[in-house]
Image (cartoon, rainbow, N blue to C red):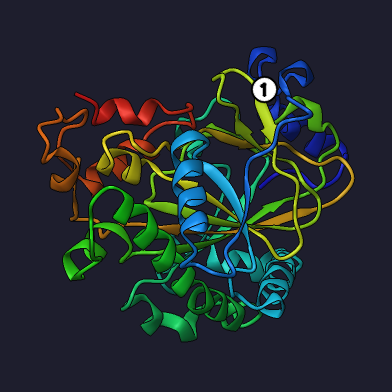
């Protein structure tokens, strides 16, 4: 876990988190006057809303939604639950450490892939698998936060389905039947990301640049900021300021592959915070492990050539986890 205080041992430990200069976020690379779209989805059936969602997914890969229907009290409660868990004594938190947890549906981890990283990310996270059968282990989840996680996931399900329906209809998929559910959204995971206050935030990273290996992701931010997405020039970065009650939506690699590049999964990163502990609560909407990924038949029916080969999702997932965060390099695994 990231060191919390600056005693001698923890100063030594901090060396593990110091990035090479070329990997740090250079202030000159931040575009202060750019922003990703913010879309009011109070009327999902409005053609302009649908158009805005699909346009943002193709150009930016990211957008924020407001008036989405997830109650503000649910959003507030799940952020508070994340703070409660990471405020527990170490011995209580560590009961859920990966490999020690009473259930494999909940796991506490640090950084991203420590076994493959020369420099660690300044982050701990607690993951909750929320598939149909995963909730059978609910009694083994941390009591300080399990109710809030389930309520958040259940409240977000209609939003997830509506977003995927709109995005898929644009690429000629008229219905999300059981087979498409299996391919797109059967294995969601909720994370509690925790970024403790950092003594030298400019030297490290909360999370290094990467894209998500999801269908789509929904991110709930707290009010501390620090989340950046890659600009359309491919070089610069755009800060995504927290908006009260908003959810940040991004396209994952799965949907980029299925859409044959109609939609874009875009790199993003998190900076460390020098003054406050920060939390965020993403939902990663994933296919089942044995789902087959590839460009959808509806996308290719006009004779368009596939840009990606077919691959089993679990194979792609394992490849992604076998190395540190490296931008979008995971997609080389499936690109023709």
Residue sitting at x 71%, y 56%: 279
Residue visible at 49% across and 34% down in the picture: 59
Residue hosting label 1: 19
Q: Quadrant of residue 165?
A: bottom left
Side of 80 relative to 309 (left or right): right
Vertical arrangement, residue 214 with respect to residue 321, above or below: below
Q: Secondary structure at mark 1?
A: loop
Residue 107 placement (x, y as % from top left): 49, 62
Residue extending furthest toward the front:
47
| Front residue of 124 and 303 | 303
Q: Quadrant of residue 103?
A: bottom left
Q: Pinpoint residue 201: horizontal percent, then vertical percent.
A: 80, 33
Asked if residue 279 lies left or right of residue 154, the reply is right
Q: Would you call the spot at circle 1 few (<14 residues within 10 Å), some (14-19), or many (20 or more)?
A: some
Residue that appears at 68% across and 32% down: 238
Q: Position of residue 54 (x, y in %)?
A: 44, 47
Decide if residue 178 is on the left or right side of residue 212.
left
Camera-side residue of 203 and 263: 263
When the figure is inspected, residue 237 is found, relative to residue 213, above or below; the finding is above
Residue 133 vertical placement versus 20 (above, below): below
Q: In this picture, is 191 found above or below 122?
A: below
In this rendering, the count of numbered labels is 1
Camera-side residue of 50 and 77: 50
Q: Residue at x 20, y 69 (%)?
A: 177
- The residue most toward the top is 22
Q: Is residue 16 left or right of residue 49?
A: right
**x%, y% of residue 229?**
61, 35
The C terminus sits in image quarter: top left
């Amino acid at each position: 876990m990231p060191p919390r205080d600056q005693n001698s041992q923890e100063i030594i430990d901090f060396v593990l988190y110091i990035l090479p200069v070329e990997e740090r976020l250079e202030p000159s690379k931040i575009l202060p006057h750019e922003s990703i779209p913010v879309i009011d989805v109070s009327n999902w059936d409005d053609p302009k809303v649908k158009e805005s969602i699909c346009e943002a997914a193709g150009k930016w890969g990211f957008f924020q939604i407001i008036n989405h229907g997830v109650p503000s009290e649910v959003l507030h409660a799940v952020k508070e639950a994340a703070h409660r868990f990471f405020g527990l004594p170490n011995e209580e938190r560590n009961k859920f450490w990966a490999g020690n947890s009473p259930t494999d549906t909940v796991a506490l981890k640090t950084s991203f892939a420590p076994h493959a990283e020369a420099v660690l990310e300044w982050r701990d996270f607690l993951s909750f698998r929320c598939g149909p059968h995963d909730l059978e282990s609910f009694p083994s989840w941390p009591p300080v936060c399990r109710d809030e996680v389930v309520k958040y996931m259940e409240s977000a399900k209609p939003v997830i389905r509506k977003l995927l329906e709109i995005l898929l209809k644009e690429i000629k998929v008229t219905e999300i039947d059981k087979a498409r559910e299996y391919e797109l959204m059967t294995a969601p995971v909720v994370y509690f990301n925790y970024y403790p206050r950092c003594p030298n935030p400019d030297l490290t990273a909360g999370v290094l640049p990467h894209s998500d290996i999801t269908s789509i992701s929904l991110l709930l931010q707290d009010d501390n900021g620090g989340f950046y997405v890659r600009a359309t020039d491919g070089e610069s970065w755009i800060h995504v300021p927290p908006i009260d009650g908003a959810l940040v939506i991004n396209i994952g690699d799965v949907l980029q592959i299925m859409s044959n590049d109609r939609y874009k999964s875009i790199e993003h990163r998190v900076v460390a915070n020098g003054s406050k502990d920060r939390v965020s609560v993403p939902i990663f909407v994933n296919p089942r492990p044995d789902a087959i990924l590839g460009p959808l038949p509806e996308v290719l029916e006009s004779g368009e050539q596939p840009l990606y080969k077919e691959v089993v999702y679990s194979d792609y997932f394992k490849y992604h986890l076998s190395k540190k965060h490296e931008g979008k390099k995971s997609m080389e695994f499936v690109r023709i």
